[in-house]
Image (cartoon, rainbow, N blue to C red):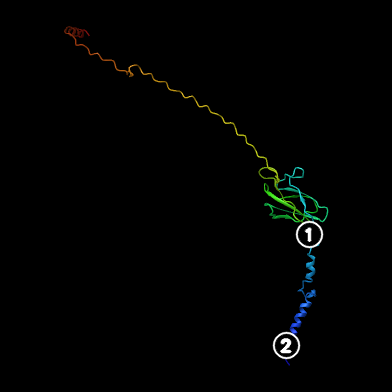
Amino acid sequence: MALPKSFIKAFLIVLVVVCIGLVPGNSKLLFGYGDTAGQFHKFVCENSTPLKVVLYEPNHPSLPKTTVKGEVILNWLKLKENADKYTIAYGVQPGNYIYGLPDVGNINSFTVRYLNPATRYYFVVRAVNGCMPGPWSQEWSAVAPGGIGGGPVALTQTAPKTTVTPAPKTTVTPKTQVTPKTQVQPKGGTVPTSQPAPVETPKPLTFWQRIGQWFSGLFK
């Protein structure tokens, strides 16, 4: 005998209602993961929020500092309560902290190492109470030592400028120009030129001179 369709529909409706009521209360029916409501409750932190940490200016003259290449010492005021560890964050741009140390211990000073020399870093610190972190401290910056230009420089410090004294210019006295002597022109307007001495033309021999010359040639 076939059951009427109305009875089947009613049975399915009752079955769905029973499943909805039983699953949340029965941990064994939650896909083998146990009581998820209890697990979610464990991740809700009930610790008190720590106060804001006071971070001191790095490399301040009255605080410990280092000149070791690639290191910067951070100092802060340790909270008296609601803090059992501290977190440090830093980066190469203000407000952009891409590096961090989640737990440096319950201390008030820490040396950040392995920094790029001659690079300015921006640091913040916050306290953590169990699983509850506090707000970030005031941001300070410092240059990691070891690069060109010497030691670290804090955010409010300005590196002294090197004054270069120019070398005195040497004045070179020009040599005295020698004025050539002025040629003195002789009076008359023209300079006489050398001319060859005139050649005298011999006079013709007389008759008696020719005879005498002939007789002298006989006795030679």
Residue 118 versus residue 154: which sits nearer the camera?
154
Horizontal and vertical percent position of residue 163: 64, 37
Q: Is residue 166 left or right of residue 124?
A: left
Any mark on residue 132, and which? 1
Horizontal and vertical percent position of residue 66: 74, 45
Q: Is residue 215 left or right of residue 18?
A: left
Any mark on residue 57, and which? none
Is residue 8 something that shows in the picture?
A: yes
Name the kind of residue labelled 1 in the image.
Met
Check the image and report above or below for 208 versus 91: above
Q: Which residue is mark 2?
A: 6
Residue 219 versus residue 167: which sits nearer the camera?
167
**Quadrant housing the N terminus:** bottom right
Q: Secondary structure at mark 2?
A: helix
Q: Is residue 174 left or right of residue 150?
A: left
The residue mark sitting in front, 2 or 1, is: 2
Residue under the point 78% across and 70% down: 37
Residue under the point 72% across and 88% down: 6
Task: Give whichever of discs 2 and 1 has the lower sequence position.
Answer: 2
Check the image and report above or below for 32 versus 8: above
